[in-house]
Image (spheres, helix red, strand yellow):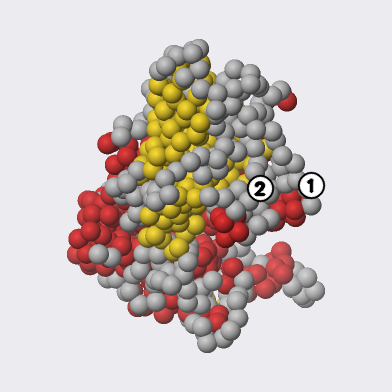
């Protein structure tokens, strides 16, 4: 049963390697290749423009009203030129800076002050929103549709008026106006909080002498398909909470393949586009049902869009009607997102962060890590402390497991005798081993629990490190300046001494090597399995995992190294208390000893000698109860029974 247990563990770890390779390395590489091929195809596609005020829907029909899908630019200008091409109102807060485009009253210029492209403090700040005429255009805008024929309402091309000294700050909202010259005056008041939430309030004053019904719309649009991480555990693309229709996550490739999707009668929710760390989302605030659309327009650069259209607003003659919406544009910081969910009553807004299907485990783990971070100021130290906490929580189970393993080690001589006694009868051998386990009250599967416990913790920690912006560019000590990135050192470049960029599989830094060593030592706490195949698997498994984890986030590798170290100490102490002679150094040295070649018995030699003078039929079977051939002068060798 010990051999079976080891075999099960070896197979499980091997499967983990295969799936890890597929999901974390091979899969993303294939996706990247497809994106590069698609980019080449898109670059050769002629540019087209969809008319303002229309939105494509399934079946190829085009409704008379709806959020526009107009592409104002094709991305052929520089960002600076695109910004200078239209009048603007500056934005400046503690968290963001940029400008409002008065053409369309559009939010299309936004940088995040607290986040930079690399760990270098002098690297450029993150650009979130950009004008449609610039590369990677990305913006949010609002407008009106459904006006009577001949009535002009503000849309993507409308140029709004702002005071000459207007500047959007948390203390100074900006008021924009537009008069259509036919009795309708539109006023838009934009405000922003100290973080990343804009409030957009639209007033419509009707002086036409006739009642008017207008439908508000809002959209988040993105030109071109951005580069995504490509991992199956993270959603990047179109996203929204659609009330009773729950969370909708649609990738760029899916919307291109399956076409537009609509969600009618959404009582409350939000919609937008999300990246790994950043997002732009619109939250309708009129508390009336709206219709949401997710779409892709096949223009030159390609247009991805999430939009909503609200219920018609009745504006009586001489009256003013108001509608209000929120726009989140910024970093997906957990405390900020949760605060908006609770303070602004935005339903399930925390799902903007992809906690995954095991959110009930992943999210609390982040909160614990964040708590320790606030105490000690280092996420790496927080991870080490959480590892100790997890070890303490599962100590009773691990203690029981290691006790069982100790008892199993004590009976190793008896198990060896059973294997020798029933060498030719595996069934009796297994029955005898089971009787021995029953007699000594040993659970042969108890040793699996330390491994099984580590799996959900490992996955959840990987998720936390990978998706949370708090971990981005979070330093540890020494050469680790970003816990969310792989260890930057590499043994194949002599840790930076050789100017060479090795292949992805050869990313082998100091911490992955430390992890491999601790894993190897932990596996040597017990003697190697009797089966040579299992010995080879257990010998090479630390090497395989060392290379596999070489490209994983450094924070995860540090966790695994520290967890292995604690497990080694814990198992060593428990086994010694159980009276087991833990010959750890001897087991390690045994691994590197040259194994003797198996000797050929005389019986086998005779049986295999086809041209021998003595017939093979005269050879005695190995289990005969008669003396075998002489092995020394005058001393017969007894056959094994």
Label 2: which residue?
A: 73
Whole-angstrom CA distance, mark 2 to mark 1, is 13 Å
Give the answer, above or below, for where 151 lies relative to 157.
Answer: above
Left or right of 32 on screen, residue 353: left
Q: Nearer the viewer, residue 484 or 557?
A: 484
Q: Give x and y (percent) for residue 533.
A: 55, 63
Would you call the spot at circle 1 few (<14 residues within 10 Å), some (14-19), or many (20 or more)? few
- Seen at 48% across and 41% down, the residue is 161
Left or right of 370 on screen, residue 421: right
Mark drawn on residue 46: 1
Which element is circle 1 on?
Answer: loop
The mark closer to the camera, 2 or 1, is: 2
Q: Nearer the viewer, residue 62 or 270?
A: 62
- Seen at 35% across and 77% down, the residue is 478
- Seen at 70% across and 68% down, the residue is 607
> Which mark sits nearer the N-terminus, 2 or 1?
1
Q: Give x and y (percent) for residue 7.
A: 49, 55
Left or right of 447 on screen, residue 575: left
Would you call the spot at circle 2 few (<14 residues within 10 Å), some (14-19), or many (20 or more)? some
Examine the rendering and report whether any part of residue 67 can be seen: yes
Q: Give x and y (percent) for residue 356.
A: 43, 42
- Seen at 72% across and 39% down, the residue is 49
Q: Quadrant of residue 103?
A: top right
Give the answer, above or below, for where 200 lies relative to 63.
Answer: below
């Amino acid at each position: 049963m010990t051999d079976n247990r080891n075999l099960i563990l070896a197979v499980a770890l091997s499967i983990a390697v295969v799936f890890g390779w597929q999901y974390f390395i091979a899969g993303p590489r294939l996706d990247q290749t497809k994106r590069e091929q698609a980019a080449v195809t898109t670059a050769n596609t002629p540019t087209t423009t969809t008319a303002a005020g229309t939105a494509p829907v399934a079946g190829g029909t085009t409704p008379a009203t709806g959020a526009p899908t107009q592409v104002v630019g094709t991305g052929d200008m520089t960002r600076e030129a695109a910004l200078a091409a239209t009048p603007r109102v500056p934005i400046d807060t503690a968290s963001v800076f940029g400008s409002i485009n008065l053409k369309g009253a559009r939010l299309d210029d936004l940088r995040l002050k607290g986040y930079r492209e690399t760990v270098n403090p002098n690297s450029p700040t993150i650009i979130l929103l950009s004008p449609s005429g610039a590369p990677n255009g990305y913006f949010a805008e609002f407008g009106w549709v459904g006006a009577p024929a001949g009535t002009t309402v503000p849309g993507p091309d409308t140029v709004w008026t702002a005071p000459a000294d207007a500047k959007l700050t948390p203390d100074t909202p900006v008021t924009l106006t537009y008069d259509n010259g036919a009795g309708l005056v539109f006023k838009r008041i934009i405000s922003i909080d100290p973080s990343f939430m804009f409030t957009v309030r639209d007033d419509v004053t009707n002086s036409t002498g006739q009642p008017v019904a207008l439908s508000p719309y809002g959209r988040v649009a993105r030109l071109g398909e951005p580069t995504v991480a490509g991992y199956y555990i993270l959603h990047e693309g179109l996203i929204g909470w659609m009330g009773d229709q729950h969370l909708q996550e649609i990738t760029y490739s899916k919307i291109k393949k399956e076409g537009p999707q609509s969600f009618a009668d959404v009582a409350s929710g939000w919609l937008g586009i999300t990246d790994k760390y950043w997002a732009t989302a619109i939250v309708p605030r009129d508390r009336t049902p709206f219709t949401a659309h997710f779409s892709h327009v096949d223009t030159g650069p390609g247009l991805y869009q999430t939009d909503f259209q609200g219920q018609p607003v009745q504006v009586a003659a001489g009256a003013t009607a108001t509608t209000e919406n929120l726009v989140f544009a910024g970093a997906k910081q957990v405390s900020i997102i949760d605060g908006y969910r609770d303070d602004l009553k935005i339903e399930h807004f925390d799902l903007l962060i992809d906690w995954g299907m095991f959110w009930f485990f992943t999210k609390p783990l982040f909160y614990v890590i964040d708590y320790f971070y606030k105490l000690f100021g280092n996420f790496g130290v927080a991870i080490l402390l959480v590892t100790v906490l997890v070890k303490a929580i599962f100590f009773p189970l691990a203690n029981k497991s290691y006790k069982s393993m100790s008892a199993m080690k004590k009976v190793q001589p008896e198990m060896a005798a059973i294997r020798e006694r029933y060498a030719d009868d595996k069934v009796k051998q297994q029955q005898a081993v089971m009787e021995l386990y029953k007699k000594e009250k040993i659970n042969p599967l108890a040793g699996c629990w330390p491994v099984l416990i580590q799996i959900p913790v490992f996955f959840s920690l990987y998720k936390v490190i990978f998706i949370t912006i708090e971990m981005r560019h979070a330093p540890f000590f020494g050469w680790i300046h970003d816990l969310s990135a792989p260890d930057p050192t590499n043994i194949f470049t002599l840790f930076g001494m050789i100017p060479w960029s090795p292949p992805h599989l050869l990313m082998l830094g100091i911490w992955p090597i430390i992890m491999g060593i601790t894993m190897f030592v932990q596996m040597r706490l017990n003697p190697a399995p009797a089966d040579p195949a299992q010995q080879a698997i257990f010998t090479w498994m630390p090497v395989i995992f060392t290379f596999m984890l070489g490209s994983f986030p450094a924070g995860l590798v540090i966790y695994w190294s520290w967890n292995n170290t604690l497990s080694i100490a814990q198992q060593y102490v428990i086994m010694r208390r159980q009276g087991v002679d833990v010959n750890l150094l001897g087991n390690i040295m045994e691994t590197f000893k040259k194994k003797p070649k198996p000797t050929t018995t005389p019986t086998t030699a005779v049986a295999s000698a086809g041209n021998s003078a003595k017939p093979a039929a005269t050879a005695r079977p190995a289990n005969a109860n008669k003396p075998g051939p002489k092995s020394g002068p005058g001393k017969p060798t007894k056959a094994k029974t």
